[in-house]
Image: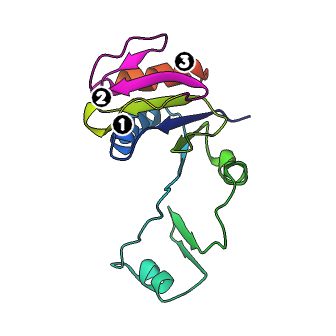
Amino acid sequence: MVPVVSFVGHHNSGKTTVLVKVIHHLTLWNIRTAVIKHSQHGFDLPVEKDSERLFHAGAGLVYASSPHMSLRYRREDSERDLKDIYDEVKAYADLVITEGYKTGPYPKIEVVRQATGDLIADLPNLIARVSDYKIDGPYPCFGFDEDVAIASFIARRFRLL
């Protein structure tokens, strides 16, 4: 089974910022990652490229393919189940990372900024935190500039190195 770790936190806490740096290091260590990003409020696609323009025109599915990358936009009648998405992406990765999914069943790293709110109460399966201030407690707490240490913690925790 491909392991999963979830990065969770309040809106604008820095989850994506941390993940970009952590994924960079995991990739340097030849650990293939797949990311499933959850957006509670939906998201907008840019309209600058042909694929996005076709999707905005109303196509139900746009699949763009090139020699080194493919991209798929698909309209959904309802939000897909995390397990179904996991089943679709796990073949491409040594580690699946989710961003969001606070109530999901997977181990979680909470990303916290003083300016964006308190810790998430009763967060199940917490294994670590990333914060811009000191947090005492039973879980390792990394600073935002400790991306190598965070990547190493994840790689060791899931026996990927």
Locate residue 112, reporting x and y percent. 36, 31
Taking the spot 40% from the left edge, 33% from the top edge, the residue there is: 111
Crowd rating for badge 1 (residues with CA inside 10 Å; few <14, some 14–19, many 20+): many
- Front residue (pair 69, 11): 11
Look at mark 1 in the image and give the residue it sits on. Answer: 18
Sort mark 2 into few (<14), some (14-19) or many (20+) by Cα contacts within 10 Å: many
Residue 26, magenta (yes or no): no
Which residue is at a point 51% across and 24% down the rendered structure image?
A: 154
Overall secondary structure of the magenta section: loop
Name the kind of residue labelled 2 in the image: Phe
Provide residue 41's location: percent of width, then percent of height.
46, 61
Region rendered in magenta = 122-147
Position above or below: 39 against 143: below
Disc 1 vs disc 2: Cβ atoms closer than 8 Å? Answer: yes
> Disc 3 marks which amino acid?
Arg
Q: Which mark is residue 156?
A: 3
Q: Is residue 44 above or below residue 100?
A: below
Q: Residue at x 56, y 86 (%)?
A: 59
Q: Report x, y in % for residue 66.
A: 50, 70
User: What numbered label is drawn on residue 144?
Assistant: 2
